[in-house]
Each structure stands twice: as C-alpha cells, then as structure tokens.
Image (cartoon, grey):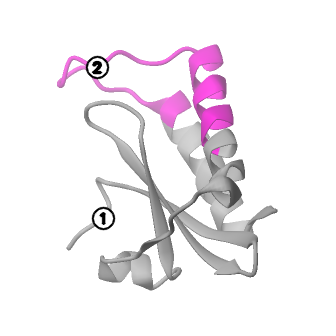
Amino acid sequence: MVFFSKLALEDIEQIFIGLLEWQTKENQQLRMTFNEVWDYRNDLYSVGNKLDTLFHNTKAQYEIHKKYGEYVYRYTRNQRTQWYFIYDKVDNDIFINKIISNYLTVS
C-alpha cells in the first residue's frame, strides 16, 4: 500500500498551483490550461500510487533526497522535467515523504 505524507500532498498541491500561475514566454513554453494542469496533478498521484508495485527500489543518492527518505523513484514527465518521489519502505508499504523536481535537486 502507498501512503503520502502531509508534505508530499502539499508538494503536489504546490505543483498544481505553480502550473496554474505559470506566466513564462521567454523559454517558448506555453501556459497550461486548467484541464492540462489537473491531468498533470492526477498523473503525479497515479505515479505515486504505483510505487508499491516496483520490483527494484533505488537508494537515494543526492543529499537533498537522503534528507527525506531512503529511496527515490524518478518520473520523467518530459524532456526537461523529472519528478523525484522520495520515500521509505516498511515491509511492503511505501511512505512517500517528498516530491521534488530535477530543478531543485542539487548534487
């Protein structure tokens, strides 16, 4: 079973709000519609909810990830963006502690 911490749930909601308010034109990326942002949010939940089906759990390598959990799953959203689900595993249960983007992951 998969459990989201309060912090991980806040991360998803902050991603949702950030994408809704995104106002950039300099890098030629278009603003997303509400439905696109809603689907993006739901995709993050879906990815997280499948972590208990993984055959292999990858140990966290970056210090910022280790701060939040022992394991990490990288979800590649597009060419520019990856989301790291940082979690701990107890028996067969997954506890997602933090969701962080590649933009905030520093080695």
| Secondary element at tag 1 | loop
Left or right: where 43 falls relative to 56: right
Q: x%, y% of residue 90?
A: 72, 82
Amino acid residing under circle 1: Thr
Residue at mark 2: 29
Amino acid residing under circle 2: Gln
Left or right: where 65 falls relative to 45: left
Residue at mark 1: 105
- In the image, the segment drawn in magenta is 19-44
Q: Report the front residue among 52 and 31.
A: 52
Residue at (32%, 61%) from the top-left corner?
A: 104
Left or right: where 28 falls relative to 99: left
How many numbered tags mark residues here? 2
| Secondary element at tag 2 | loop
Q: Report the front residue among 54 and 70.
A: 54
Q: x%, y% of residue 80?
A: 26, 36
Quarter of the image for residue 26 reads top left
